[in-house]
Each structure stands twice: as structure tokens, then as C-alpha cells.
Image: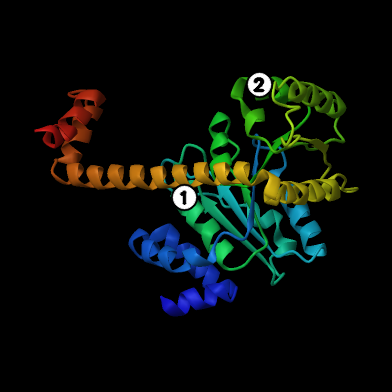
Amino acid sequence: METLVERVLERNKRAIAKAISLVENHPDECEQFIKKIFPYTGKALVVGTTGPPGSGKSTLLNNLAIEFRKRGKTVGIIAVDPTSPFSGGALLGDRIRMDELSADPDVFIRSMGSRGSLGGLSRATMDAIRVLDAAGFDLILVETVGAGQSEVEIVRTAHTTIVIGIPGTGDAVQAIKAGILEIADIYVVNKSDRPGADEIARELRLLLTLDPHAKDEGRWRVPVISTTNLPPVSGIIELADTILQHQVFLNDPKNAALAFEQEMIRRKNEIHEIIKVEIFENMLTSLIGRQEWEKILKDVISKKLDPYSAAKSIMDPLFR
């Protein structure tokens, strides 16, 4: 493991891939590995992107990574795909869209399954971000599954959160309903070459002015940026500039208290998540191991037992 740690710190792509596979598939070894690389983390800017399926998140990240490479920045990309509830697998197709970046030695791309996590960010994804951070990437771009209101989870992980909307889908109204605007550090109207793009951008800017704290001194002003991913590409340079401006804002000594508060929230949520997973998985494994699990399932399927009674019968030994 010491050799793997050393090679990850050297930004060896093969070692990074092996380390991420370790955090995905071997939770016991993962814990020891994270302990060793943790002192080397905390330098990367983590940029999370969320938005509805079909909003062009993958292509946007591809173009954004290309722009940052032009500026000499090293880039790690984690694309989270929804995991099948039946097979446990995921399509992991985002790397196909980012093929032109894969040969760049200063870019690392990894697709990961959400593994049933509600917000699309599994514990393994958070550890993978830490691996890329320890490997010394300047920016880590995280694409979430884009599955709706649960996407607010990205704000617990990223320093900068980009919310993507597209014209013609009522995103401005949906944004109010989902509270999605509240998590955005940057709002992007993608596919802005489509009809209605200017209108949704205006609506979003108006909604942002309704925030009672929008004009508070020292507060980050959430911009609305229009982008087009297909040639001629537009808005990507402005988006990259804004991301770096947000990083400067977070690192400004005047905003140290805000940055520390946000980091406290991120670390608190991460520790809570670890505790919940450990308690749930250990308890479930222990309880199911004592039961005739297959018999219970067959009884539910044959209607001899309802799901609530089945769950209660499994949990009963815990409370005796």
C-alpha cells in the first residue's frame, strides 16, 4: 500500500485508477489508504455540476477541461452515472464524450456509479475526489447524475457548485420548487443557441435579485452565464474565468469566516455520512445473517407476509 500511496502522490495514472478501484470495491483497505493520503489533500478546487438529464453536463465539462488545460491547469474529472437497481451496474458512458482528453497526461477521467446514493454521490465518489486531490490536480470537476431535487447533495462536497439549465424545459420555475437555485454559485444556461435561452436567463437573473441577502456586502453574487457546447462554442471562457474568480473569493482573507463555515459543513456532513453507512451496513449484515432471508422474501412474494411485517421480523432481534 505504501508504494501505491507514493505513486498516487506522483500523479501516476495507473496508480490513481487502482486507488479509485480500491475505494470503490474494498472498503476495509480504503479506510487505511485514505488515512495515509489525507495529509496531502485540501489543495484542489472541487467544482460540482448538476442539472437535469440531457442538459449537456458532460460536453460542458469536456469543453471546460479543455479551456483549463489551455491555462496550464491540471484537471481530474469524475462523472457519476446512475447505478441500476437490478444489476448494480452503470453505463459509465461519459468517458466516450470526453475521448479527446483521455490521452492528456495532465487530465484524469473516471466514471463511477452512484451505487444507489440518493443525491448521486456515493461515499466512494467522495473518497475518489480525495484521491485526485492528493494526486495534485488543480481542479476536480464532478458531474452528478442529474436526477432532480436530490442533486442538492453536491453542495456538501464541492467548493463551487454549477447548476445547469436549458431552455424549453421550465427550469426557472422548477428551480424555485426544488430550491436548486439556493445551492448555485454559478448558474449556466446551456444550449443557449436554442429559442427561449435569453428568456430563461432573464428569469433566473430576476429570481436571484429576489434573494433578500443578494446585496449583502461581502456576499458572492451568483452570475448567470449562457453557454453553447456545439461549434461555435461560446461562454466557456467566461465560465472558466468565473470559476477562478469564485476561488479567489473563497481564498480572500475577508471571507475566511465564510470559507471556514462552509468547510465545517462539508466535513460534518461527510462524517455523518460515514457514521450512517457504518451503522446501517453493519446492523443490516448482522440482522440479515440471523434470519432465513430467502424464506422471508418468498413469503412476501407469495403475499403470506407484508413488507412491513417482514422488516419488523428482521429487526426484532435487535430490540430484544
Q: Quadrant of residue 219?
A: top right
Q: Position of residue 248 (x, y in %)?
A: 74, 51
**Is residue 17 something that shows in the picture?**
yes
* Residue type marked 2: Ile
Q: Quadrant of residue 218?
A: top right
Return the residue at label 2: 176
* Residue type marked 1: Gly
Q: In the image, is 268 to the left or to the right of 305?
A: right
Q: In the image, is 228 to the left or to the right of 243?
A: right
Using the image as rendered, state which of residue 158 and residue 226 is in the foreground.
158
Which sits earlier in the primary sequence, circle 1 or circle 2?
1
Q: Secondary structure at mark 2?
A: helix
Image quarter in which the N terminus is found: bottom left
Q: Most extreme residue toward the front, as rendered?
A: 254
**Mark 2 residue crowding within 10 angstroms, few (<14) / some (14–19) / many (20+):** few
Per the model, the C-alpha gap separating discs 1 and 2 is 33 Å
Return the residue at label 1: 89
